[in-house]
Image: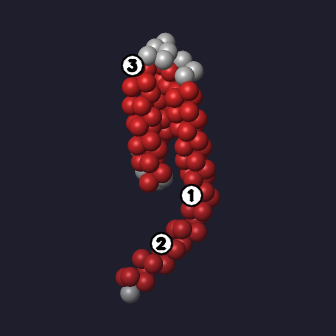
Amino acid sequence: MLGNTTSAVQLCFQCFTAGVVLAMLALSELSSPRLPECKQGLARLVKSLEVAGAGSPLSRQSVDILMEAMHLISAEEVKELVSRPGNRRKMYAVSYQQQT
């Protein structure tokens, strides 16, 4: 839409920065109820970059990085879901030891 204009470059920078912040928020607390909002926000930013950048190198690179961040979030989320029962046992043991 905007192509290689200065406005498109500024929009790409802003979307990329917002995407990195959302990815960091998502990765910092995977059990947060805000995780789905962060992932949806990332997806919207990727779509915006694809439209606004119209295939510019900056847009493509930003989309690639944010998509990789989304894959990383998903992988970490799966790791946490799979390891959760063991973590609960450890938490119960620690909390029990602290009570005694």
> Which class describes the residues within 10 Å of circle 1: few (<14), some (14-19), or many (20+)?
some
Q: Which mark is residue 18?
A: none
Q: Position of residue 50 (x, y in %)?
A: 54, 23
C-alpha span from label 2 to label 1? 14 Å
Residue at far bottom of view:
100
- Residue 95, compared with residue 44, is above or below; it is below
Which one is earlier in the sequence, the residue at label 2 or at label 3?
3
In this view of the protein, which residue sits in the foreground, 84 or 54? 54
- Residue 33 vertical position relative to residue 11 in the rendered view, above or below: below
Picture quadrant of residue 71: top right
Label 3: how many Cα within 10 Å (few below 14, some 14–19, many 20+): few
Residue 29 versus residue 45 in the image, above or below: below
In the rendering, which numbered label is found on residue 91? 2
CA gap, disc 2 and disc 3: 50 Å
Give the residue number, with chain letter if any, for mark 1.
80
Q: Secondary structure at mark 1?
A: helix
Instruction: Give the percent coordinates (x, y) of residue 85.
Output: 58, 65
The residue type indicated by label 2 comes to: Met
Q: How many marks?
A: 3
